Amino acid sequence: MNNFYQLNLPVQLFKNFDHGDPPGWRARWGDVPPTRWEVARVSVTDYVNSQALSFLDNLGIKFQQESLLFYGPPGAKVFIHTDGDKSAGTDTWSEMSWGINYSWGSLDSDMIWYKPKEDTTVDLHYTAANNPYTLYTDDQVIEIERCKLVAPSIVRNDIPHRVINYDTVNPRWCISLRPVSEFKSWEAITLQIKDYLLNVSDLEFNCHAVR
Ligand SMILES: [Fe+2]
């Protein structure tokens, strides 16, 4: 089971928006240091075609009206984390378990997934967009996969992961559509959308699993 699949939908998911700095956000975040990774909520319809939302809706896949907009400053490395609250040792589903991501700006970045080592304890935190997440230190995890998101992709968020922006000039912008209540697990959503995923072997150039 991979933690990432590039989408191959019969309709164009994202609008042909200007792939520069989203209006207003660079002014707000442009000076944050590379130790920060910013996030805010923006309207899905600003970025996504309504035909694509209808297509996914017909598959039973529905999204929140607001998506997440991430800003990774040049050279930034987000902390290793799991989206959602795993601090109580429960496996409570949250809107954060998976997302459909699309990034631009940075010319070189990786999304990386990890396996926690045995007996790892984690702390609960909240993002600026009020999403719970749990943090890991580098020595609490083992890398299992990394990918370059070069096109709209479905990504797993309920295991430890991070993004590194290797581009020291350009920020990494990312829109992440988050689901409502159906298809809570990674297994369930990737099964439901399996006819519209690119084969992993097509992606060897951009991805590799660490075994
Ligand atoms: Fe995340």
Image: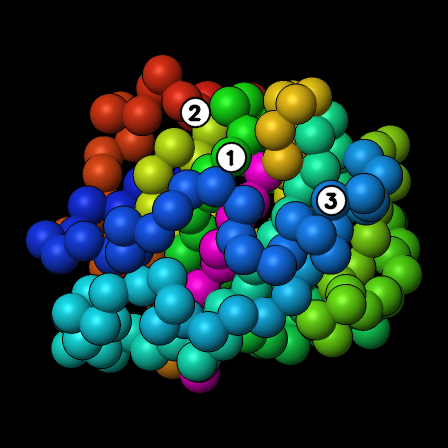
202 relative position to 67: left or right: left
Q: Position of residue 61 (x, y in %)?
A: 29, 74
Give the label, 3 or 1, closer to the camera.
3
Amino acid carrying mark 1 in the image:
Gly
Q: Position of residue 140 (x, y in %)?
A: 84, 39
Determine the image quadrant of residue 62. Answer: bottom left
Residue at 61% in and 29% down: 170
- In which quadrant will I find the N terminus? top left
Outermost residue on the top side: it is 205
> Which residue matches tag 3?
30
Residue nearer the viewer, 40 or 10: 40
Secondary structure state at the residue bearing disc 1: loop
Mark 1, Cα crowd under 10 Å, few <14 / some 14-19 / many 20+, is: some
Residue 30 is covered by the magenta coloring: no
Secondary structure state at the residue bearing disc 3: loop
Q: Is 172 located above or below residue 70 in the figure?
A: above
Residue at 89% in and 61% down: 123
Q: Ligand 1 closer than 8 Å to the CB at disc 3?
A: no
Q: Ligand 1 closer than 8 Å to the CB at disc 1?
A: no
Q: Spatial distance from mark 2 to mark 3, Cα to Cα?
A: 29 Å
Q: Which residues are magenta?
A: 172-181
Q: Is 108 located above or below residue 83 in the figure?
A: above
Of callouts 3 and 1, the N-terminal one: 3
Q: Is 20 located above or below residue 38 in the figure?
A: above
> Which residue matches tag 1?
105
Q: Position of residue 17 (x, y in %)?
A: 34, 51
Q: Which mark is residue 207?
A: 2
Of callouts 1 and 2, the N-terminal one: 1
- In which quadrant will I find the C terminus? top right
123 relative position to 37: left or right: right
